[in-house]
Amino acid sequence: MQNNIDIPDELIKILRGAERVAVLTGAGISAESGVPTFRDAQTGLWAQYRPEQLATPQAFQRDPRLVWEWYTWRRNLVSAAKPNPGHRSIVIMEKRVPKFTLITQNVDGLHQRAGSQVVVELHGNIERNKCSREGIIRTPDAKDKGIPPRCPACGSYLRPDVVWFGESLPEQALERAWRASGNCQVFFSIGTSAVVQPAATLPLIAQEAGAIVVEINPGETPLSRQVDHHIDGPSGLVLPEMVTQTWPES
Ligand code: BV8
């Protein structure tokens, strides 16, 4: 056991023989890549807003420029960020577990950049834009310097292709997340405060279906009392340790 991260032996044994594993990640897994977590205090201009006030259709309706500029600030942060050992450990898990499903609440695309082949994006992806009227994925004209830019097809504002509060999640993604959570033997909840619905129900669906539920998070969350194992620590440290102990040859 290095860097005093204690991974339960029982979990290593189960994980080594597991056929079906599901992982749910939240903003915490990107914290060590320098991407502030969703509920961390926003910095600079954004310190005066709570994310829940900006990530809504109403906010965009009221002040499209402000919301677009918040996403531009976050996009710049994300594009400068690099995947960290936590993201890379999940790539190894995907290779080692026959039926592995990665479900993320994150919109930063860091799992894909780390090499995860299959990523179920519950809340969309900040790197994509869509027409705010038709919902079709669109790329703004390079010449369009508007803030926000306009949809090249219909002239409505473009918006980030993310799920805002009060909006429904992409049906297919949610279906896949529900199915994987209801069929897995081990479910990991990693770096999420476990408050945003419907993602926060996934570990409970897994537990209902008989899976071992493991939370990796520094400090407690509302889920901590219900899980089989709470491993307290940063995912960038815990995950590499867990993967090395489970698959020493990896
Ligand atoms: C829905 C994309 C059906 C945007 C996000 C009233 C009206 C309507 C809906 C609701 C309502 N009241 C409640 C709801 C439901 C609402 C909700 O859950 N609200 C919450 C605030 C209670 N949900 C919705 O609206 C969802 N849609 O319900 O549709 C519907 C439709 C119409 C009408 C009614 C119902 C949509 C939710 C999706 C919102 N979009 N993101 C964007 O990013 O800009 S959610 C946002 O929160 C991010 O995706 C983020 O990932 C997610 C969850 O947060 P976390 O990932 O957990 O991040 P957080 O900062 O909270 O926590 C970080 C954790 O990391 C902490 O635990 C910390 O300890 C840990 N950590 C820190 N460092 C590390 C670490 N862990 C590991 N390692 C480290 N180093």
Image (spheres, rainbow, N blue to C red):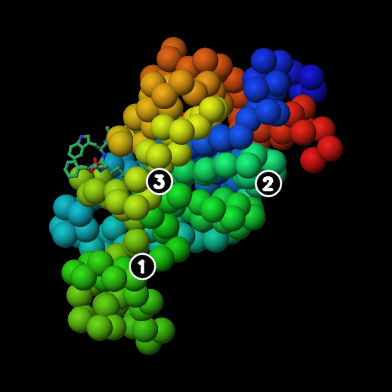
Residue for badge 1: 129
Which mark is on residue 176? 3
Q: Nearer the viewer, residue 38 or 191?
A: 191
**Which quadrant is the N terminus positioned in?**
top right
Q: Quadrant of ligand 1?
A: top left
Callout 2 secondary element: helix
Would you say residue 95 is visible in this rendering?
A: yes
Mark 3 Cβ and ligand 1 under 8 Å apart: no
Which mark is on residue 95? 2
Q: CA distance from mark 3 to mark 2?
A: 19 Å
Q: CA distance from mark 3 to mark 1?
A: 23 Å
Q: Nearer the viewer, residue 241 or 176?
A: 176
Q: Nearer the viewer, residue 39 or 228?
A: 228
Mark 1 Cβ and ligand 1 under 8 Å apart: no
Is 238 above or below relative to 29? above
Q: Are marks 3 and 2 in contact (CB under 8 Å)?
A: no
How far from the left and from the top, in percent, is residue 152? 28, 83
Q: Amino acid at mark 2?
A: Lys
**Residue at 29% over, 58% down:** 67
Which mark is on residue 37? none
